[in-house]
Amino acid sequence: MTSVLPLPSEVSERVATPRHYLMCRPEHFAVTYAINPWMRPDIPVDLALALRQWDELRAVYLDLGHRVDLLEPLPGLPDMVYAANGATVLDGIVLGARFRYPQRAGEAAAHAAWFSAAGYERVVEPEFVNEGEGDLLVVGPEGEETVLAGTGFRTDPRAHAEAERVLARPVLPLELVDPLYYHLDTAVAVLDPVTIAWLPAAFSPASQAVLRSRFPDAIEADPADAAVLGLNAVSDGRNVVLPAQATGLAKTLADRGFTAVPVDMSELLKGGGGPKCCTLEVRA
Ligand code: ARG
């Protein structure tokens, strides 16, 4: 029997699954301090535009059929819009965050309180610094997920074992080396249970080798797409919501059978974030 391998453009239809997200409207968004190289307190932020862009992101998720819950924004926490950093949720277990910098410390309790009020029974306050899904990305088939765990700039390597214990999944430690890609979700996008897109140069040589062997079908992002935080994308298995400026990556995704859904997040980029940073996935 002969078999013909499908060409990349003929990959079988990708399947979207409905998701549950937690978001926080950027009502108090500002860039008043700099804890990553994208943040420039001297450059003004257009708050009205940030709100419009965020409203549009939420509308995109609702149009795609996803559920979006909202976390109450708190004054004095301008980075709270980056909801992905507040927790990591798997099997309904909530591993809370502990932030590296004091400017964001207050966000952790707000997330934990939200999950407790929503009826989540296991909300764990961590001992070590972890910045939620900024550095802990869940990948793999349901029940057999692995947690890709970034370190180097924010999340403490000791948090990896803690995540493994609390979430009851193996953790794959990955070392980030470029301060522009300070969170794992700026350098890797999880597209489906077996496919990631990533920027190899953001990782140490050892971590590059680990990712290459683990994800042979990975999409290597062009540095120009990564530089507009194109990898800060949110996928439901088929639709990939990504920064509109990442046009090359959008084309590659389309070639691989995904539907690219571009959103303009230019104002939130001034804080060093894109669509994924604004989106915490809640896995029941
Ligand atoms: N200004 C925020 C910080 O530096 C941006 C967080 C972006 N979030 C993310 N998931 N990458 O902490």
Image (cartoon, rainbow, N blue to C red):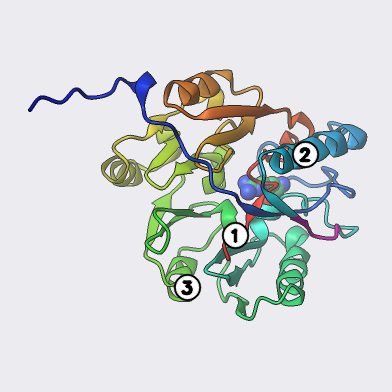
Q: Assess disc 3: are there few (<14), some (14-19) or many (≥20) residues with their C-alpha within 10 Å of its C-alpha.
A: some
Residue 71: say if magenta: yes
Q: Position of residue 131 (x, y in %)?
A: 60, 59
For disc 3, the marked residue is: 162
Q: Quadrant of the N terminus?
A: top left
Mark 2 or mark 3: name the one nearer the start of the chain.
Answer: 2
Q: Which of these two is toward me, 77 or 234?
A: 234
Q: Secondary structure at mark 3?
A: helix
In this picture, which residue range is highlighted in magenta? 69-73
For disc 1, the marked residue is: 132
Q: Disc 2 versus disc 1: distance between alpha carbons?
A: 24 Å
For disc 2, the marked residue is: 59
- Residue 229 sits above or below residue 77 on the image: above
Q: Secondary structure at mark 2?
A: helix
- Residue 261 sits above or below residue 142 on the image: above
Q: Quadrant of the C terminus?
A: bottom right
- Residue 32 sits above or below residue 164 on the image: above
Q: Is mark 1 within 8 Å of ligand 1?
A: yes
Image point 70% across, 42% down: which residue? 61
